[in-house]
């Protein structure tokens, strides 16, 4: 067997080793995420905002998140397929997270349960930009180990005019890390984003 | 202009997403993680679309970005609450139809060799384009490919021997 044939055989085996799987992420999700980041960065240039409509027209796909089950509030709390928020005895709010989806809805649910919070989901982590966060986080939030992720919050222990800042991410589709801070409402927040992209004809792939 | 760019990106996404996913899956071995990384690659591609659209192989840009993202994804995180051992969510098993043993060998290859494999095998790039994408000489692409093939061939040979012994 020649070297070329041997190489072809090995590369063929590698190709055959990967199943014929398909991306499930709709293009609207990509567009929405890019638009959101671009807005946060305050960049100008390519108006990603217009892309959502245009890509929807091009591919004829449904809106982001369509088809995802989002049932209404249950008698004792709000519930989504991926997470639940419940208020228990003593006003203790318990968030149980299995998957990281619909962070905006989680933020809204927390507000309904008396927990002012910013919920950031994605590949970056957010923190108060200037100065130190407020003390007393451990009195407000407890986070026992285990999976699914459980976060217990005592809204009554939160200082006046404060809010919680959660940064959530995921590994293998499941929530695996939680970054949290107690900050003053309205305090400037920064998120660690990927680096800016080089200009030029052949841009380098972005590094983390 | 915007509509043209949108249509162009959408067509690019539709045409290349599955190949990019398979290329990254071969390197990471976890379908959900691969999907997350490739999504991230496409998000960044869209954010830099005016440059990426002129790239000789935009799909390769996405794959390299996804693989780079995997390396450094967690370095940026601060104040994370690590899971204790045994708490980590169970990783899903290999996808049906996946040769987990061979892909484990692929994952053990150095990054550059894995990149060459991904670009040559899953994106069907030729040596010249692969070299241009990676910013290395065509001869270096050949050297990486030879080393990768030699390593993987050793695995395939031993696997064949094992199978032969098992059937005796």
Image: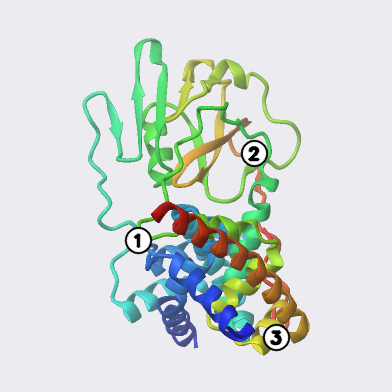
Give the mark nearest the N terminus, 1 or 3: 1
The quadrant of the picture occupied by the C terminus of chain B is bottom left
Residue A50 makes an appearance in the image: no
Label 2 and label 1: CA atoms lie apart by 30 Å
Q: Is residue A33 or residue B58 the one in the foreground?
A: B58
Give the mark, 2 or 3, whose residue is nearer the N terminus: 2
Q: Nearer the viewer, mark 2 or mark 1?
A: 1
B27 or B10, nearer to the observer: B27
Q: Nearer the viewer, mark 2 or mark 3?
A: 3
Front-lying residue, A107 or A102: A102
Secondary structure state at the residue bearing disc 3: loop
Disc tally is: 3
Counting from the top left corner in percent of width and height, residue B77 is at: 66, 43
Q: Chain of mark 2?
A: A
Tell me the CA gap for discs 1 and 3. 32 Å
Above or below, A35 relative to B57: above
- Identify whether A76 is placed above or below B147: above
Q: Which mark is residue A64?
A: 1
Vertical relation: A154 (above or below) A115: above
Going from the N terminus, do you reach mark 2 or mark 1 first? Answer: 1
Residue positioned most to the front: B168
The front one of B38 and A182 is B38
Q: Which residue is mark 3?
A: A201
**Residue at point 58%, 20% (across, down):** A159
The percent position of residue B74, horizontal first and vertical second, equals: 65, 46
The tag on residue A187 is 2
Residue B140 at x, y = what percent? Answer: 77, 80
Q: Are marks 1 and 3 on the same chain?
A: yes
**Is mark 2 in CB contact (under 8 Å) with mark 3?**
no
Q: Secondary structure at mark 2?
A: loop
């Amino acid at each position: 067997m020649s070297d070329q044939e041997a190489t072809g055989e090995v590369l063929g085996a590698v190709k055959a080793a990967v199943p014929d799987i398909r991306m499930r992420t709709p293009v609207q999700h990509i567009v929405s995420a890019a638009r959101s980041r671009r807005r946060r960065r305050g960049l100008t240039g390519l108006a990603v905002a217009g892309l959502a409509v245009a890509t929807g027209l091009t591919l004829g796909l449904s809106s982001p998140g369509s088809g995802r089950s989002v049932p209404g509030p249950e008698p004792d709390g709000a519930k989504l397929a991926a997470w639940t928020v419940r208020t228990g005895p003593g006003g203790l709010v318990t968030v149980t997270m299995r998957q990281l989806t619909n962070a905006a809805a989680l933020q809204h649910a927390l507000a309904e349960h008396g927990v002012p919070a910013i919920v950031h989901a994605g590949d970056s982590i957010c923190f108060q930009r200037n100065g130190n966060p407020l003390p007393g986080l451990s009195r407000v939030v407890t986070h026992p180990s285990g999976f699914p992720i459980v976060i217990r919050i005592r809204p009554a222990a939160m200082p006046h005019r404060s809010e919680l800042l959660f940064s959530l991410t995921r590994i293998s589709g499941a929530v695996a890390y939680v970054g949290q801070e107690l900050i003053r409402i309205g305090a400037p927040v920064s998120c660690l984003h990927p680096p800016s992209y080089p200009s030029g004809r052949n841009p380098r792939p972005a590094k983390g | 202009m915007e509509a043209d760019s949108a249509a162009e990106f959408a067509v690019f996404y539709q045409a290349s997403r599955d190949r990019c996913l398979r290329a990254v899956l071969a390197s990471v071995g976890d379908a959900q993680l691969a999907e997350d990384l490739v999504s991230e690659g496409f998000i960044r591609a869209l954010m830099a679309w005016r440059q990426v659209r002129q790239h000789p192989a935009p799909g390769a840009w996405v794959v390299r970005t996804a693989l780079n993202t995997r390396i450094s994804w967690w370095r940026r995180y601060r104040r994370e609450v690590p899971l204790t051992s045994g708490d980590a969510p169970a990783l899903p098993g290999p996808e049906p139809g996946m040769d987990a043993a061979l892909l484990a060998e692929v994952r053990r290859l150095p990054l550059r060799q894995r990149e060459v494999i991904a670009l040559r095998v899953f994106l069907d790039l030729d040596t010249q384009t692969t070299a241009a994408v990676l910013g290395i000489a065509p001869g270096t692409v050949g050297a990486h490919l030879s080393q990768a093939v030699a390593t993987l061939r050793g695995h395939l040979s031993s696997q064949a021997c094992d199978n032969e012994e098992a059937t005796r």
